[in-house]
């Protein structure tokens, strides 16, 4: 009986058969969490609703959605459908962050929604093993979120 249980457990965890595969999975998911957390920290420090945890989960979720099929050998052409699903799902999440006030001409949450969308894209890059692309994209997104508002406010003075 115990031998059967052990054999079953081994087969259930066979998607990470060696240290190399475990390292690959951990690097991609941890980098997605870290980069999502950086963007989330910036949003949270500005008092926005979607903060560190939201951005980390979005990035890790997007990474996981592409990591698992890639490690399973899914063809690149088929991976496009997975990415379409991610974009659609994140669009729904982002739509929940947008608030249109009926009494004012003010719409809030567009930047938060765009940031969540960008965070998902960064997560996809991490999940596909495009770490440099993910890091550079995060730095550019951070520049847009943190530096551009300062430049715009200087120009208004």
Image (cartoon, helix red, strand yellow):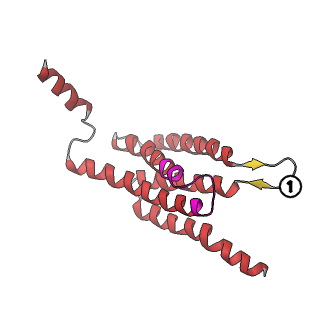
Q: Nearer the viewer, residue 72 or 127?
A: 127
Q: Residue at x 70, y 53 (%)?
A: 109
Q: Is residue 40 left or right of residue 107?
A: left
Q: Where is residue 90, by image quadrant?
A: top right
Question: Helix, strand, or loop for circle 1?
Answer: loop
Q: Is residue 76 left or right of residue 8?
A: right
Is 48 inside the magenta-drawn segment? yes
Part of the protein shown in magenta: 43-57
Give the percent coordinates (x, y) of residue 153: 73, 76
Q: Residue at x 27, y 52 (%)?
A: 23
Give the percent coordinates (x, y) of residue 82: 50, 40
Q: Nearer the viewer, residue 85 or 154?
A: 154
Q: Which residue is mark 1?
A: 105
Give the percent coordinates (x, y) of residue 33: 43, 54
Quarter holding the N terminus is top left
Q: Main secondary structure of the magenta part?
A: helix
Q: Is residue 123 above or below residue 141?
A: above
């Amino acid at each position: 009986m115990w031998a059967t249980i052990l054999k079953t457990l081994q087969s259930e965890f066979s998607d990470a058969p060696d240290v190399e595969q475990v390292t690959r999975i951990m690097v991609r998911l941890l980098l997605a969490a870290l980069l999502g957390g950086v963007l989330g920290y910036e949003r949270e420090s500005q008092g926005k609703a979607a903060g560190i945890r939201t951005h980390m989960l979005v990035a890790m979720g997007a990474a996981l959605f592409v990591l698992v099929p890639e490690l399973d050998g899914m063809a690149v052409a088929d991976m496009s459908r997975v990415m379409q699903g991610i974009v659609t799902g994140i669009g729904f999440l982002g739509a929940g962050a947008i608030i249109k006030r009926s009494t004012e001409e003010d719409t809030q949450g567009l930047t938060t929604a765009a940031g969540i969308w960008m965070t998902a894209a960064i997560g996809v890059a991490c999940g596909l093993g495009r770490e440099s692309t993910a890091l550079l994209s995060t730095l550019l997104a951070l520049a847009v979120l943190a530096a551009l508002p300062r430049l715009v406010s200087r120009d208004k003075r």
